[in-house]
Amino acid sequence: MFFLTAIMDRPVEGKAGEAIGRIEDVIVRMGDDRYPPISGLVVRDGPRRFFVSANLLQKLNGAARLSSSTVDLQPFARRSGEVLLRRDVLDHQLIDITGRRIVRVNDVQLTLVEGAYRVVGVDISPQALLRRLGPRALAGRIVGRQIVDWTDVQYLASTAPVQLKVSYDRLAELHPVDLARIVDALSYRESAEIVAALDEETAAETLEEVSDERVADLLEGMDQERAADILEEMAPGAAADALEDLDDEVAEQLLARMEPEEAADVQALLEYDEDSAGRIMTTDFVRVPARSTVGEALALIRSLEEVPDPLLAVYVVEPEDPATLRGLVRLRTLILSAPATPVTEVMDEDLPTVAPEDRAENAARILAEYNLLAVPVLDEERHLLGIVTVDDALAVLLPEIWQRRGGRTFA
Amino acid sequence: MRKRLWPYLLALGPGLLAASAGNDAGGIATYASAGASYGYGLLWAMVVVTICVGVVQEMSARMGAVTGKGFSDLVRETFSLRQTALILLTLLIANIGIIVSEFIGVAAAAELFGVSRYVAVPLAAVFVWLLVTRGSYGWVEKIFLFLTLAFLAYIGAAFLARPDWGRVLHETFAPRLHLEYGYLNLLIALIGTTISPYMQLYIQSSVVEKGVTPEDYRYTRFDVVVGTVSAGVVAVFIIIATAATLYPRHIVVDTAANAARALEPVAGHYAEALFAIGLLGASLLAAGVLPLATTYMLSEALGFERGVSRSWSEAPIFMGTFTGLIVLGAGIALIPGLPLIQVLVGVYVLNGLLLPVELFAILRLINDRELMGEHVNGRTYNFIAWGIAVVVSVLSLALIVMTVAGWLR
C-alpha cells in the first residue's frame, strides 16, 4: 500500500535499470470497478510527455520499474473515460458518503489488488498536507492519516475535463436532507451535476431542503420538462417558494408544463405571501360529507388513490357544498368509534381556524396553544382552503439558523 | 430595444457591490491623502488604476463564469501545494490587513461622533459576529451599503469647491511624475486599495454562485464595467474635492476629521457627521464580508467543513477561524496610540506589495487552455494584463528598495 504523492516525480526505470523518465501522472480508468485500476503512467522526460501502459509496469512503489527497455514515445493525449490522479483527483473535491460531507483529497492511496494497481482510498487528513508542504526528508516523521475508502466516495465527473461515465449509485445512500446540505455547499455547476443524477422523487425531496435561490438557479439551468416533473413531486409550498425566485416568464413556462392539477395547487399558493398561512398550508386532505358514517369515512380513505401523508384527521363538510367546513374527526376517534356511528356525532366543532393571509407564525402559535396537529385555513366566506399541519409549522417556528442557508456566497 | 437592455440591468449587482466595497475606510483615507498631499498630482494614476481594476475584475469574473469554480478552488486544483500555500498566505495577510483597517474605520467614525473607540470597536466586533453567525446579514448589508451613499457628497463637494477644471484636466492627461518616497508610497497605496484581492474573490465567487455561463457572461461583464467606472468616479471626485479644499491650505489628512473637512462646502457643520456615517457604513459592510470571505477561502482550499450555520462542534476550524479573524482585526485596531489614518494607508501599501502574487496567479489561470478553453485572454488583452502585473511588481519593488535604502542612510 502506498501513496500518490510518494511516487509523483519519481524516476521510471527500464528492464535493465536504465533511466526512462519521471512519473508525471497516473492514469486511472473509471468504470464499473469498485476500486478503479491504473491503466498507465504519464512519464516525463525533459519536455516530452508520453504514455506507458500499465501492462509494462513491474513495480510502481519506490522507483517504478518496467518490464521492457523500449517504450513508445508517442506523445500523451487525454482520452475520454480516463482520469489523471494528480491533475483531476489530488487536491480536488469529493463527496464523502459515510461522512455526509464534501472533502478535499490531500493524498491518494494505491495498492496492488488482483494483479493490478488500484485506487483504494483518499487521505483527507491535514497531516497529509503538512507532509507535502515540508521537505521530503521530514515527511516520514509526520504521522496520522484519515483514509476514506474509495467505495465510500462520490467522484464528481465535472472535475475532469474529459467525458466520464461516473456511477452515482452511492448518492442513493444519502438522506435528502444531507444531499441538500451538500448541494448548497457545492458550487452551482457541481450541484447541478448531483441533482441531474437523482431520480425525480429524490431530487424533489432534496430541493425542498435546498435554499430558495439555489433551487431557482438549478431549475432554470435544467431541461424544462425535467424541472416541471420535479416541481410536481415537490410539496406545493416549496414549489411555490422556488417559482417565486424565478423570472416570471420562466415560472409561467414551467407551470404550463406541469400537470394541470399540480400546477393549479402551486398557483393557488402563489396567491399568498411568503410566510403566510396560505403559503405553508397543505391542500391535500380528506373531506367527508356530513351524512357519512365512521365506516363510510374509513372506506373513503381506503379508496383514495393517494392518501395524504401525514393523515391526522378527516374534515366533515356540507354534502351539497364541500367547501363549507362543519368540523373534523381525528383519525384516532375514527378508528375507535363503531363503524355505524354518524361522523357528525364524533366530530369536533368550534375549531380554531386561521385565514390564509395570517402570518405563518400565527398558525404555528395556534397549533401550540390548542395542542392541535393541524389547523384548518378558511377564507372570508368561511370556505375550507387547506390545513396547516404541525410539520409545516415546525419549519416556521425553528429559528432561521437551523434552516439551510444560502450556499457559499459571502453575504 | 427594451428587451435587449433588460438582461443587462438585471445583471447589475455583484460587480457594482464588489467595486463599491473597494471604496472602504482605507480607500477613502488613501484618496483623501492623495488629494490633500499632492493636489491633482495623482489624478492620472486614479484613472489608470481604474482601468486596471476593470481588467483584473473582468478576468476574475470570466474565470468564474467559464470554470464554475471559486478562486481558491482553482488555485488549489491547478498550482502545486507549495505555490497554493504561498498564494493563500499572501491573500490571508492582505485580508487581515484590510480587516484591521475596517475596524479602524469604525473607530475613526465613532470618534467623530464623540464615542470612544474602546467602546465602539468591541461593540462593532460583537455586532458583526452575531449578524453573520445568526444569518441575518443579508438585509443589514443593504443598510450599510445605503449609508455609504454619503460618500457621493464628495461629488457635490468637488463642484462646490470650484476647482480649476482646466488644471484638473491638464494634470489628469499630462501628469508630472515625481520619483520620491511619499509619492511612490501613495501611488502603491492607491493601487493596493483599488485592486483589493478580496474584490476579485468576491466577484468570482458570486459569479460562480449565480451559475453564470459563458453564454450569458456578457451581462456580467457589463456589470463589472459599470461597477468599476462608478467606483472610479467617486474616487476621482474625492481626490478633486480634497485637492481643491485641503491641498491649498496644506492640511494633511492624518485624522478622519481632516478628511471630513473636504466635505464642508456641501455639508457645512454637518461635514463630520456625514463623513462619519459613510465611513461607518463602509467599514461595517466590509468588516462582515471580509472575515467570512477569508474563512471560506481557507476552508475551501483546505477542505474543512464549512458554513456559518454549522455549530462549533460541526465546523470547529471554520467557526474558530472566522471568530479569530474578527478578534484579531478588532484587537489590533484597539492598540492605544495607533495613528489611524497612517495605519490605513500602510495597510494598502502592504496590499499593493502583495498584489503581484495574486495578479500572476490570475494570469496563469486565465491563460490555461485546459481550464478556460477558447475563453483565454486575447493577445492585446493579455499584453495589457501582463503590463499591469509587471508595472505593479516594478513599483512594489521600487518601494521596497527605497524603504531599505532609507533605513541604510
Image (spheres, rainbow, N blue to C red):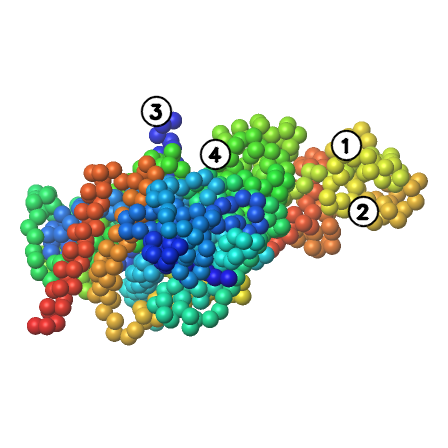
Cα distance between the residues tagged 4 and 3? 19 Å
Q: Which residue type does callout 2 highlight?
A: Arg
According to the picture, the residue beneath numbered tag 1 turns out to be A322
Query: Quick check: do tags 2 and 1 share a chain?
Result: yes
Q: From this viewpoint, is residue A56 visible?
A: yes
Query: Chain letter of disc 2?
Result: A
The type of residue carrying mark 3 is Met
Q: Work out whether residue B119 can be spotted.
A: no
> Which residue matches tag 4?
A247
Secondary structure at badge 2 equals strand
Q: Nearer the viewer, residue A186 or B172?
A: A186
Residue matched to label 2: A330
User: In screen coordinates, is B337 left or right of A140?
Assistant: left
Looking at the rendered structure, the kind of residue marked 4 is: Asp
Give me the C-alpha separation between circle 2 and circle 1: 18 Å
Per the image, the residue denoted by label 3 is B1
What element does badge 4 sit on? loop
Instruction: Write down the chain letter for disc 1.
Output: A
| In this view, the mark in front (2 or 1) | 2
